[in-house]
Amino acid sequence: MPTAQREAFSTEGNDGALARALIEGLDVPLAALRAVLESLARDLGEDPRGACVSGALAEVSRAGRTVQDLVDFTSPPELMPLECTVEEILAGARQRLPRGARERVLVARGDRAHKLFIDGPLLARTLHRLLESAVEAGSGHVLVSVRCEKGATLFTTVSHESGAEHSADHCGDQRSARHSHGRDLGLALARRDLARMGGELSLTRTPRGETVVVAHVPDASSCGRS
């Protein structure tokens, strides 16, 4: 997002109005377009043109998620800490993904009964953004693991970025750029919301091409921060 646009979105006093404008101006037409495309995809069935419709439907769904991300960017939700388990948080994050993407997320065994006192829904939404980013960046599986340390819980995602999305044709390059911008916004939101909950986010890439993202969450979160 350009600096001027980012500053405009963060201007105090305009956040609520901008969020309402985004919702009112885009939610209804996007929902209508999505419904039309879903109906068309069903009618086409095995017709080869169905793949084009499915691609358009995916782009519309992605646009809807971007609108919600922009709304979240302008109006951070109030923190509401509660006691929840790691299992509940992981289930909430994974369930938000489309079915096909959900099946590509592998959750390693760990202490899923471990409890946190934190804004569970917000943490689940934050982890969902990380999973969504990892799924869109590659074509393989995404591994999620949880490790409990003294006073902290670490949620780690490991993925391998695919070169398939970097198509040589112009349209492929445009799609890749749009997806990259969407992932950047999602990661920025994840980093911000983790910080609000007293946590932090780190991202590293290994020599083997793996992307490792770690969400470090304190067990006794400073949930009163805004």
Image (cartoon, grey):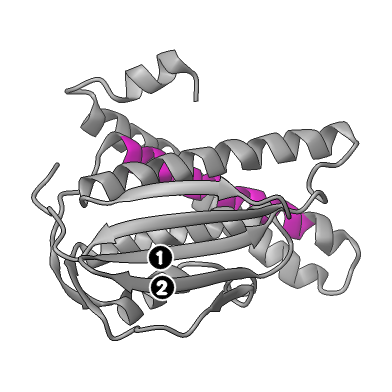
Q: Position of residue 85 (x, y in %)?
A: 26, 79
Does 13 sit left or right of 109 as displayed? left
Looking at the picture, tell me which residue is in the foreground, 154 or 85. 154
Q: Say which quarter of the image contains residue 134.
A: bottom right
How many marks are shown on the rendered structure?
A: 2
Looking at the image, residue 6 lies above or below residue 149: above
Find residue 54 and name its label: none
* Circle 2 Cα neighbour tier, 10 Å, few/some/many (<14 / 14–19 / ≥20): many
Does 145 sit left or right of 55 as displayed? left
The residue under the point 36% across, 60% down is 125
**Residue 59 within the magenta-colored segment of the rendering:** yes
Q: Which residue is mark 1?
A: 155
Does 217 sit left or right of 147 as displayed? left
Q: Secondary structure at mark 2?
A: strand
Residue projecting furthest to the left: 224
Q: Amino acid at mark 2?
A: Val
The residue under the point 47% across, 73% down is 145
Q: Say which quarter of the image contains residue 181.
A: top right
Task: Mark 2 and mark 1 in contact? Answer it, CB < 8 Å.
Answer: yes
Distance (Cα) linking label 2 and label 1: 5 Å
Q: Main secondary structure of the magenta part?
A: helix
The residue under the point 39% across, 22% down is 6
- Magenta stretch, residue numbers: 53-73
